[in-house]
Image (cartoon, coloured by chain):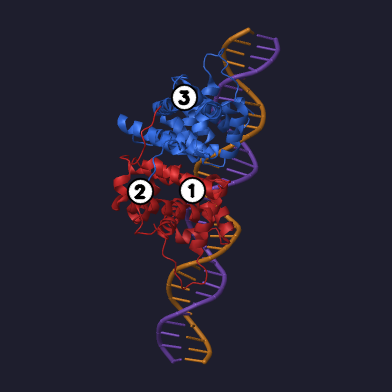
Chain colours: A blue, B red, C purple, D orange
Amino acid sequence: MSAPAAPATSRVDRAAAVRAALRTLVARHGFHGASMSAVATEAGVGTGTAYVHYASKDDLVYATYLEVKQDLGRAAITGVDTAASARTRFLQLWRGIHRHLSNDPDRARFLLQVESSPYARTAHAKALAAEDDPILREATTTDLRAQLASLPVEILYDLGIGPAIRLAAGSESLDKPSLTALAEACWRAITTDGIATRRT
Amino acid sequence: MSAPAAPATSRVDRAAAVRAALRTLVARHGFHGASMSAVATEAGVGTGTAYVHYASKDDLVYATYLEVKQDLGRAAITGVDTAASARTRFLQLWRGIHRHLSNDPDRARFLLQVESSPYARTAHAKALAAEDDPILREATTTDLRAQLASLPVEILYDLGIGPAIRLAAGSESLDKPSLTALAEACWRAITTDGIATRRT
DNA sequence: CTAGGGTGAACGAACATTCACTCAGGGTGG
DNA sequence: CCACCCTGAGTGAATGTTCGTTCACCCTAG
């Protein structure tokens, strides 16, 4: 049901090549354009090879989703200064996510594609069961938690880092000041502290 | 290439029934689960009927997308007090969008499904060409414009009303105070005025 | 030699699309 | 008023294609 860790012994990791091919094809042409034979061709392996490592196409999709999410979580916490303030840590996290996905926008596109598909429910459940998301951990176990608006965590996720993912998935990129402005807009959205009294 | 307006003379509008069936099936089971025969069955018409009104499945998808977007735009501006402040008008617009989509979450789910699929590019282009979006007009031609952060309009759209759409598409709903809090979080995200000095 | 990853032709199911056909409704000549 | 035909929306079985999946066979590392 799940992907084995990279075997490391074999000269080429065909299972990883298949996952990468699925990622690329789904990102570029959707699930519609990611048939198993197309995936095999893209990966440079035979049609049957994917079935040596995964029981079904669904299984491959879930394994690929988990891999992308885990890579993202790992990349996100890199460069976050644990001693910094909650706001600074959030902005570092945000930029880490955006940097990682911008380097390979297909990852972001794949994530969005899976998350708004019938795979979403199961994929999300498997992700929660399999890994302990560093991004979620940051939001729930540090002093950042106290500054967040009292909204469901999925919504805070969508407001806070969703824009980073969707920006990386898009075709156009932002200049550096705009990127900072966007990250700060996300921070404004998820926090309520320090808002000045405002008149309508 | 495009949907004719409702004929009004015929007793049942089969083209509209086909569009509604596509909406429902794509929302609930994705494009994967929305085969033309399944759509025809759901609509209660013959397999060939869809092809009397639409040249292809793609054509049907685009026509349905346009209909959903137009209905949303129309519903959104209803109940917006043009004399009110920019902030109040935004919140009214936001709640109008959320109310309309919450009444039929399949519309929201269909929108998200199309917008993160290979149909997205063409669908978006057709929407821009066909209609003059009241939501976009509100953001670009009123005093709201001056208060918006200087970010690309697609990003402001994503930050400002994207959460309303994604919330309506989700399975769980928010209580009224949380809904207000979320709408205000969106306002905070897209505007920069009145931010208090903040300490890290 | 053996075990097991790798292979691609083959298979049945499901797909989008077509087409020969039906038939209700409306215009027209008588 | 009737009898007629004409039109085009509606239909669903049939079509060719593509899909996910299988399997009998081939390597090659150990």
Q: Which residue has dot 2 on it?
A: B125
User: In whole angstroms, how far apart are the C-alphas of marks 2 and 1?
Assistant: 32 Å
Q: Amino acid at mark 2?
A: Ala
Residue depicted at 39% across the width and 40% down the height: A196
B8 over A175 or under it: above or below: below
Question: Are the residues under marks 3 and 1 on the same chain?
Answer: no
* Viewport quadrant of the N terminus of chain A: top right
Q: Which residue has dot 1 on it?
A: B180
Q: Position of residue A70 (x, y in %)?
A: 53, 25
Q: Position of residue A161 (x, y in %)?
A: 45, 33
Mark in front: 3 vs 1: 1
Labelled pair 3, 1 in contact (Cβ < 8 Å): no
Q: Chain of mark 2?
A: B
Q: Which residue has dot 3 on it?
A: A76
User: In whole angstroms, how far apart are the C-alphas of marks 3 and 1?
Assistant: 31 Å
D5 over A13 or under it: above or below: below
Is residue A175 visible in the rendered structure shown here? no
Q: How crowded is the residue under tag 3: few (<14 C-alpha within 10 Å), some, or many (20+)?
A: many
A136 over B127 or under it: above or below: above
User: In whole angstroms, how far apart are the C-alphas of marks 3 and 2?
Assistant: 34 Å
Residue B46 - label = none
Residue depicted at 51% across the width and 41% down the height: A116
Residue depicted at 47% across the width and 47% down the height: B164
Q: Position of residue B81 (x, y in %)?
A: 38, 59
Q: Position of residue A173 (x, y in %)?
A: 34, 33
Q: Which of B74 and B98 lies nearest the eye of the viewer? A: B98
Q: Amino acid at mark 3?
A: Ala
